[in-house]
Structure formats: C-alpha cells, structure tokens
C-alpha cells in the first residue's frame, strides 16, 4: 500500500489560494462567537478593589481604563467632577480583588484586617471628603469581574478553559437531563468533550466523544442541576440507554466527578446557567402542542429540510421534535428545540421560498411535489400556527455575508473535521455552505448566520487545528510554482504592471538609518530580501520581520496600526507583536497592487522615522540615494516631522547659487537703529544684506532643560521691568558688567497683575527685588492657577500679545491649570512641536504663573 505524503511546498495557504482564485473571505467581525472567545474579561469600565502599595490590608476601588493582558491602566474612585490620575497595575504582582471583596471578608470574619480606605495622598488632597459615602454611591450598581479572572492563568475564555476541567452537558433529547463531561481539549473555545461513564460500561459500549463551543446553550457549570432542582436532574446520556442506578456504577461515577471537579473548577462565569428567552418562550408551552407538525433542518446531515412532529413540550419553553418517518425501519433523529430555533419553520415555508422539501421516508403520494394539506389530512394532525415561529429581524445579507465568500465550516456528519467552505446561497438568516473538500455533487449544508459551527478564514491555522483544504488546492499550488518559474521577478516596481498583485523582491538595506524604533543589529541579521510572491503575503512578512527587530515591538505595531476608515486600494491584515509573555495584535493596512509598493514602503519608513530606503524594491548595496550614513539622527527626525528645517538638505548636498552679501554691524549700530533683518532686506532690494542681531542677555536661570535655560522671574531686576506690549521705557541706563545692552530684548506681555513693578533695589550690580511688593504685584486679581480649567488657561493666553496664537492649541489638548504649570521646554518642543521661539515665550508665562501660585497660594 502506497501512502501519499503531501509535499511541504504544496501545503494549503489561504492567502495564496484567495489570491489565485480571486475569491473573498467572510469578514472576521461577523463571527461573534470567535470574537467573544478572544475578549479579555478585564474590560474598561469595570471596577476592582486594589491593594495599597504601602499597606497590603488597605484597599480602594478603581476603574479599569485600559487593559493590556495582565497590565491594567486604572484610576481610583474620587470626588465627583474630579479627574483622578491613572496608574498601571500588574495583577500578577499587585493584589487586586473583585468589587465587594472586602465587605465579604468582613462578613465572613469580623476580625479580618482588610478594610476599605483611600490612599493617603488622596485623603490629604481632599480632607473634607466623606469617603465611605463616596464609595457606596460611586460603586452601587457597577459591574466587576469574577475572582477567577484575576489569576495569572489567563484572562480570555480560550486561556481559562483548560484540559481536565468538567462541565455539565444538557441531553440532546431531554432538556431536563444533565450529565458531567470532561474537557479533553480546547481549540480556540471549541471544546472536545467526553462523557464520564463507568469503566465497565465504556469497555463494552464506548460512548463517542463530541465537540461543543463553550458558548453552547447546552453547557453549564458542574452542580447547576442540583442548584436548580426538579425537574432538572442527573441522568446518563440518552445515547447510552442506561439508567441511574448503583448496580451499573452510574451513581458512584457521578459523585466521583463532582468531587474531582472541585480540584480544578471550570470558570463559573463562562457558564451562567439557563439561558433567558424572550417573550416568545411561552409559546413553547402554550401553542406548541404534542403531535403538531412543522418543518425542520435534518439534524443528522443539515442538508435537507423535512417534516417533523412535536413529541414533547416542557415548561421551560423547550420542546422535542422528531423527523417524520412512515416506514418505521429506522429510528428518526430527535432533538430539543425552542421557538427561537433558527432551524424550524412553519408548514409550507419551503414551498413559499421555492426550496425542495424532502418527504418522510416511506411517504407515497400521487402528487409530484409534497403537499402539506394532503399530508395533514392523511396523518390526522394539525400544523403549528405560523405566528409561533420567531422571525429573525436581521438577515445574513444585512450582516455582511455574500454568496461566494470563503470560510471554514464543521462537517456536520463528522464534527472532528473542519473544512474550507464557500457560501453558495443565502436565504434570510440561513447560509448554504458547500464544503470544498468534497465533490460539487454533494449538497451544501444549511447553517444559521450566527452558528457556532462556522469560523473565519485562518481560524484553524491560528489555533493549530488541521484544516481539510479544497479539492483543487494542489492545482492552485502548482500554478503558483509555475508563475514563480516562468515570470521573472521584476527588479523595480517600475517594470511591474500597475494592476498586478505580484510583488517584487523587497530588500532590507541594513546599512541605512534605522530610526528610533528599530535595532540596526537585528536588521543586519534579517534575510537580504523577501519575495517575490503575492503582494499581501510578501508585505505582511516584511512588516512582521520589521516588528521582530524593534526595541519595543508593541510600539512599532502601534505606529503601523490602521485607525478609522481603510485607505482606498489597501487590504487589512492582522499583525502580532510579542512582548515577553504577552501577545498584542492590531490591524495594519497593506498595499494591494504592485504600483503601490515603493510608495507604501516609504510611507512605513516615514512612520518609523527611518531612512526612506531602509527597505523596498531597490537594493542599494550600501550606497543610499539620500546618503543617510553621513547624516545625524536629529536631521532625519527633523526631516520626517517636517516641522523644522535642517541646515543640510536630506540628500546631503548644499544648494549652489548667488551668495548673499553679509553686512556685519557692530552692537552699537544695532542698538541705535533697532532694525531687524526683514526691514533691512526690504530696503536694499535685490542686494540682500543680513545684520547680526544683538545678543540677548537674560538673567540667571532657575529651570534647567536640555541645552536651554529659562529665566528666573524671582530674580528680576531693574533691567527686566514688564511694560505694556514690551515697550516700557523705564529701563535704566546702567548695564550689566558683561555683554551688550538688554534694551533690544522683547519680553512677553504679562497679565495686568504684574505690570509696573517697582521697589527694585540694587546692590553690588546684581538685581534684587522687594519680595513683598513683587508678590502683591504678581498676584493682584489672579485666581488660583491650580483651579484653572482649560478655558481659563486659554483665556489667560489670549490676553498676551506673544502667545495668544497658542491658546486654542492648548485648549484642544485639555491643558488645565495644573497641566499648564507642569509644561517645560522639552515637552513643548518634542510633543507639541512648537518652534523654539514660541516655546521659550510660553515657558516665560509658565514660570510667571508658577511663581504667583507658589507665593500666593502655597503659604
């Protein structure tokens, strides 16, 4: 016997297949059960009790602002209309509890040492606050998380459901019957389950394993049937045909499973118990009667719609239906249903939607098509009223499903198999899905648009589960090989067709400037090039390689993230970055045509502030077109920000042209005429002159910054007298011992509270101030800056003549009084991108406001 071994080069790759066949995939967002399986339980808005770092017994509630794995950005509960500062908490290192945990500990043990009390810094800032009243009002009705979610073992359902845990499973024939099953495996939230049965029984009559997604309404936490009570009870699975008695060992195995489940309990919050049904639930008990007829999708194969009969009705709103069979030669399939079931229909639904109905096995009629009136008359039964069936408000087409889209689907006849599939038909909320691994003659299976038996493209690959590929995937793989061999890879993007989806080689020019995010050493270890191949695959691999070379991969992923509307002719791909044990993912826009490759590579380089030729379709062999090896980091940073100009152009060359005539003036001449460069140039016409500006002398500096200093307004002397619009003529004739006159220094206009300062005393040539008079002048009519809102800051700046244009920008950034006084020169230059001129002027105002605040309001 010869075994066929699939060549590694012929392995099925979804993206290759979609590129060659020009097919589309179902958007991932339409699979809500998959999205929920990856969501963290620690969502923003939930409240937890966080231990004080100085006192482990003291806790205080805090709200989650952002989650990043085990790291949470939180802010404490504080007074109303007060913006509390945010802080980061690593729940693996800091004791974090669900809301109400301290109260539960006190109730369980009155001598418990844990208590609720805000941090000491908060109490000092708000000494008159009633913290206990604040806690009760701020946390009433708020949501928290289960204590299991705060462990270091995982925060998503995929991570929390582990092998060996036990769950209760509702019987597929009777909703009142439950039995315990063990989780054999967890594949992306899809659970491989095995009923717990006595060893003697399993040896003689092995019970088959089965699969259910963790959100299935048939799954419950262990002990739910005991808590609910009659009529719910534990009974062996109906497929075993056994009874709960001590002789068979079923009672013993049941008690043993309950005890074993306590050693490794399953997350109770993931199995919340009986699902709530809407108002139509009462229909199951009132209008659905035993013996009534309806139409249903055959639960055995999901490929045909058959007549069925209601055989049992339960007070929960559930009822049992059985596919009709007149021959009696076999046991027809039975399953539990409910009014909202997407797979049941009124009698005649198939005919009204022009769908063939499979008649009962053994039904004989003279009519060519199945006739419901004849069938009801012959069987002396009635149909379930049409109004009993709940109609889905949103159709599959409304949700975004389209005929021809690709997905991954479970083979209903063999639930261990997942196949590549195609949507062939859409009707209401139903999808007809063809499993591409079988011949076209095999009918499509019928699934609901919200079914948990279908998954997005790539789900099996991301969860390490085998996928049964389409029948023609080997032909597609060989077609790709032939294209690679026959079509030589273009050397540059210029030779590539504008509409081509074939990407040329993308070279890594590791000698180019790498920027602040990427490691030059790691880039040197990358392969010389990636590709050629399908454009999305090549660019995705290139970006993944770049992320792997980052100092902080998460930061690079953040820079590449596509936010808002997807750009035209771009494709969204999910990229991942790993930081220690945490994995981050984000959607990144990728070019889809060959003519975009070069510009796309440069745009990515711009985001990463690296050389525009760091990677791309051209290999420069160390000879960068812009000569980045000769330029400094500051020149590239300035180039990409486009806020300031460097002394040397980005290409490393200097422009040649007519030299300017430079007229050097003495300091005395500058002081006399007081003209600036612009006025001088305008007066000379074509002959351009450039005056050397007078050197500005500032007093001693109090705030030290990077290569810049700010004036100390506490030491303002007679040489610095604030005047209206900077034009006060009270500057004394006496000058400093060194340096030119300060007459030409232009100072920003201070608020009215600090104008016309007097009482200046000189001693030994150094300016001194009468402190009492200065304090009075600086704070007259000035409210407490710490209490300023962002509107107050903007109002203050608008009154100045030199920084009024910055008022709206600071207001847009939500800069209030406290934030205003914390600004400094590096922050204004690097974060706000202000020019050095405006940054220094604004810092002068900041120092003035801080001085007024410290002298008047910090007594």
Image (spheres, rainbow, N blue to C red):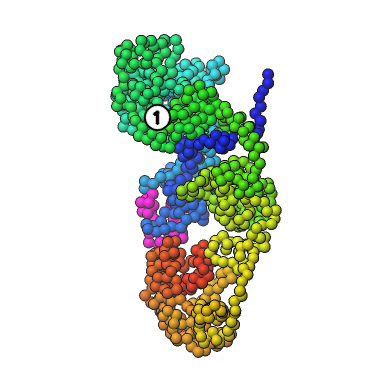
Which residue corresponds to mark 1?
Answer: 427
Tell me, yes or no, whether the highlighted magenta stretch contains residue 120: yes
Asked whether the viewer can see residue 461, the reply is no
Q: Which residues are magenta?
A: 115-139
Element on which disc 1 rests? strand
Tell me, yes or no, whether the highlighted magenta stretch contains residue 741: no
Image coords of residue 127 (percent x, y): 40, 62
Front position in the image: 611 or 302:
611
Considering the whole magenta stretch, tell me its main secondary structure.
Answer: helix
At 66% across and 27% down in the image, what residue appears?
A: 5
Image coords of residue 768 (percent x, y): 50, 83
Image coords of residue 578 (percent x, y): 59, 46
Front position in the image: 201 or 327:
327
At 51% across and 64% down in the image, what residue appears?
A: 833
Q: Is residue 38 left or right of residue 754?
A: right
Badge 1 density bin: few <14, some 14–19, many ≥20, Cα 10 Å: few
Q: Quadrant of the C terminus?
A: bottom left
């Amino acid at each position: 016997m010869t075994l066929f071994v699939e060549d590694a080069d012929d392995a099925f790759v979804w993206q290759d297949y979609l590129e060659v066949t020009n097919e589309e995939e179902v958007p991932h967002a339409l699979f809500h059960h998959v999205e929920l399986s990856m969501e963290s339980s620690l969502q923003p808005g939930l409240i937890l009790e966080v231990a004080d770092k100085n006192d482990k017994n003291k806790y205080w509630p805090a709200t989650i602002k952002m989650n990043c794995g085990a790291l949470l950005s939180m802010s404490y509960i504080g007074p109303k209309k007060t913006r509390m500062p945010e802080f980061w908490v690593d729940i693996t290192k800091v004791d974090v509890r669900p809301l109400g945990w301290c109260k539960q500990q006190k109730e369980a043990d009155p001598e418990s040492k844990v208590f609720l009390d805000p941090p000491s810094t908060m109490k000092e800032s708000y000494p008159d606050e009633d913290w206990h009243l604040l806690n009760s009002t701020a946390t009433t009705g708020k949501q928290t998380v289960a204590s299991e979610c705060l462990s270091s073992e995982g925060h998503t359902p995929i991570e929390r459901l582990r092998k060996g845990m036990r769950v209760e499973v509702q019987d597929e024939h009777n909703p009142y019957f439950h039995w315990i099953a063990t989780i054999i495996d967890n594949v992306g939230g899809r659970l491989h389950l095995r009923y717990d049965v006595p060893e003697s029984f399993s040896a003689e009559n092995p019970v088959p394993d089965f699969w259910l997604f963790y959100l299935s309404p048939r799954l419950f936490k262990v002990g739910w049937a005991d808590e609910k009570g009659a009529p719910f009870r534990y009974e062996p699975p109906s497929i075993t045909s056994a009874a709960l008695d001590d002789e068979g060992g079923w009672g013993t195995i049941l008690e043993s499973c309950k005890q074993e489940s306590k050693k490794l309990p399953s997350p109770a919050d993931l199995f919340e118990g009986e699902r709530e049904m809407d108002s139509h639930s009462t229909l199951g008990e009132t209008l659905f009667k035993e013996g009534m007829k309806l139409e249903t999708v055959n639960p055995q194969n999901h490929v045909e719609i058959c007549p069925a009969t209601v055989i049992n009705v339960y007070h929960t709103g559930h009822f049992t239906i059985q596919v009709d069979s007149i021959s009696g030669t076999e046991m027809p399939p039975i399953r539990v249903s409910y009014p909202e079931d997407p797979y049941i229909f009124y009698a005649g639904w198939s005919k009204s939607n022009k769908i063939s109905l499979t008649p009962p096995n053994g039904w004989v009629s003279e009519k060519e098509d199945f006739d419901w009136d004849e069938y009801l008359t012959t069987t002396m039964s009635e149909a379930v009223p049409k109004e009993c069936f709940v109609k889905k408000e949103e159709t599959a087409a409304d949700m975004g499903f389209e005929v021809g889209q690709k997905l991954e689907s479970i083979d209903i006849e063999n639930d261990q198999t997942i196949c590549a599939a195609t949507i062939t038909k859409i009707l209401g909320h139903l999808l007809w899905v063809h499993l591409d691994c079988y011949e076209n003659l095999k009918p499509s299976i019928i699934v609901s648009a919200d079914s948990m038996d279908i998954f997005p493209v790539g789900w099996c690959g991301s969860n390490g589960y085998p996928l049964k590929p389409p029948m023609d995937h080997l032909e597609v793989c060989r077609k790709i090989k032939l294209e690679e061999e026959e079509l030589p890879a273009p050397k540059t993007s210029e030779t590539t067709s504008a509409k081509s989806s074939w990407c040329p080689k993308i070279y890594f020019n590791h000698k180019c400037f790498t920027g602040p995010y990427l490691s030059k050493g790691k880039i040197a270890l990358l392969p010389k090039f990636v590709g050629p191949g399908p454009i999305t695959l090549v660019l995705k691999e290139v970006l993944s390689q770049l992320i792997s070379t980052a100092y902080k991969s998460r930061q690079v992923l953040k820079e590449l993230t596509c936010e808002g509307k997807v750009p035209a002719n771009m494709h969204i791909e999910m990229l991942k970055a790993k930081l220690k044990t945490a994995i981050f993912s984000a959607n990144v826009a990728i070019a889809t045509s060959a003519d975009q490759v070069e510009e796309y590579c440069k745009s990515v380089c711009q985001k990463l502030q690296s050389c525009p030729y760091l990677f791309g379709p051209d290999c420069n062999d160390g000879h960068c077109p812009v000569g980045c090896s000769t330029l400094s980091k500051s020149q590239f940073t300035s180039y990409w920000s486009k806020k300031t100009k460097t002394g040397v152009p980005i290409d490393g060359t200097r422009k040649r042209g007519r030299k300017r005539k430079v007229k050097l003036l003495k300091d005395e001449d500058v002081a006399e005429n007081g003209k600036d460069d612009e006025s001088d140039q305008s007066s000379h016409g074509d002959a351009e002159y450039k005056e050397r500006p007078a050197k500005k002398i500032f007093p001693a500096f109090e705030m030290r910054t990077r290569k810049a200093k700010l004036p100390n307004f506490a030491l303002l002397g007679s040489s610095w007298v604030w005047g209206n619009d900077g034009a006060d003529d009270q500057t004394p004739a006496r000058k400093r011992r060194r340096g030119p006159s300060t007459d030409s220094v232009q100072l920003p206009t201070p608020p009215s509270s600090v104008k016309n300062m007097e009482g200046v005393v000189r001693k030994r040539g150094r300016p001194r101030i009468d402190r009492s008079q200065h304090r009075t002048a600086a704070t007259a009519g000035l409210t407490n800056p710490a209490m300023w809102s962002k509107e107050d800051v903007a109002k203050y700046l608008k009154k100045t003549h030199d920084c009024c244009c910055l008022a709206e920008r600071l207001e847009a950034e939500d800069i209030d009084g406290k934030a205003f006084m914390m600004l400094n020169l590096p922050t204004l230059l690097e974060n706000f991108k202000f020019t050095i001129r405006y940054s220094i002027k604004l810092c002068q105002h900041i120092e003035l406001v801080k001085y007024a605040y410290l002298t008047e309001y910090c007594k």
